[in-house]
Amino acid sequence: MRIALLAHGNFPDDAKTAVGVLRYSDHDAVAVLDRDRAGDRVSDHLPDVQDAPIVADFADVPDCDALVIGIAPIGGGFEEGWRPDVTAALRRGCDVIAGLHDPLAADEEFARLAAEHGAELQDVRQPPDDLTVADGTAGEVDAHVVLTVGTDCSSGKMTGSFELRDAARERGIDAEVVPTGQTGIMISGWGTAIDRVISDFAAGATERLVEQAGDHDLLFVEGQGALAHPAYSGVTTAILHGAQPDSLVLCHVAGRDRVGGYDSFQLPDTPDYADLYESMAAPISGATVEAGLLNTSEYDRETADEHLSTYADVLDTPVADPVRDDVDAVLDSLLAGVGE
């Protein structure tokens, strides 16, 4: 499928969904929409992902099948500044794919234009209607289940999940990502956005996903939020208990010591954070933190290596930057206990 990615004013640093789709999706990206960077190319700002022109609005987008909203703002709301591009895409007969809490299908103008021009509004954050509470059975799957957890939001859980999956597949291992957020769903074409699920059913929704993918040998469940986050700890706990993982990978952003967007809240020290995850997991699965992933993108190579060394020391596990380096040592640690 040929897609355009909307990322006005946010590409690349604050366009997590657009970057994830560019890096891991099989879709052919024909353009990125960002008025602030129009005239540039993706490769001017991001290495090792699909390249495409950056344009000012949808009128400048080549022929494509769909417009993807590539921004995941806090609260998941639709911004009216995006409306001209969405309406232009629908008038061209392009589908519009979004992972917002505000469903596009509920917008009367968008619904009318979609019907008139044979386009589809795909709200990937909308959960199934038949979810239930968890039965506590995810631990019965034959697959080895790894959950990526974080010290904060946007700490590399989705990225780490896909990098570890790809590294495992390179070794001939039947591995899959279990998507629990909108970006992972857009990349994989399946999954459930757990943060949109009724709280009583969130663990059950996670359990269902793990069981649906349980015929693979190795599963990487995409974590959400963070256990000590003042706003998003609920979804984190639901995934931790619903997935009943065998192993945990703790993701962190180098140099970050306060919760993003909540500067009055200090992050726990790394060893304490690992202990917190293990304590919460203990009654349900007994999973332990067996490796770490560290985002060092803000630092030069020498400083990044210092952060990686320190993180490995304090966590007392193998660590890696999943984008900058390979994840072989992390994968080795996760596979060491398989079959025991």
Image: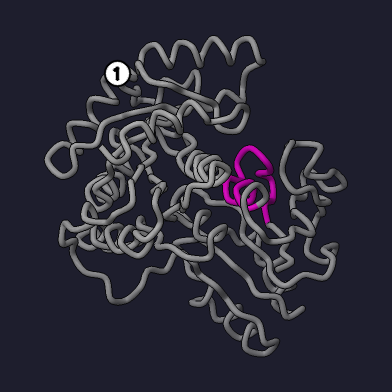
Q: What residue do we see at 38% from left, 34% from top?
A: 334
Left-right relation of 149 to 87? left
Q: Position of residue 292 (x, y in %)?
A: 42, 27
> Can residue 253 be seen from the camera position used here?
no
Q: What range is drawn magenta here?
A: 6-21
Name, please, the residue furthest toward the bottom. Answer: 116
Find out whether residue 13 is within the magenta segment: yes
Crowding near the residue tagged with mark 1, few <14, some 14–19, many ≥20 C-alpha atoms within 10 Å = some
Left-right relation of 40 to 125? right
> Which quadrant, please, contains the N terminus?
bottom right
Which one is in front, 273 or 228? 273
Q: What residue do we see at 36% from left, 13% from top?
A: 314
Q: How many marks?
A: 1
Left-right relation of 272 to 295? left
Residue topped by disc 1: 271
> Which quadrant, please, contains the C terminus?
top left
Q: Eyeballing the image, is 97 above or below 32? A: below
Residue 279 placement: quadrant: top left
Q: Position of residue 82 (x, y in %)?
A: 65, 61
Q: Position of residue 24 (x, y in %)?
A: 62, 50
Which one is in front, 17 or 330? 330
> Can residue 51 be seen from the camera position used here?
yes
Q: What residue do we see at 46% from left, 50% from top?
A: 175
Left-right relation of 138 to 104? left
Residue 257 placement: quadrant: top left
Name, please, the residue furthest toward the left. Answer: 283
Amino acid of disc 1:
Pro
Q: What residue do we see at 55% from left, 81% from top?
A: 108
Which SS class for mark 1? Answer: helix
Find out whether residue 1 is within the magenta segment: no
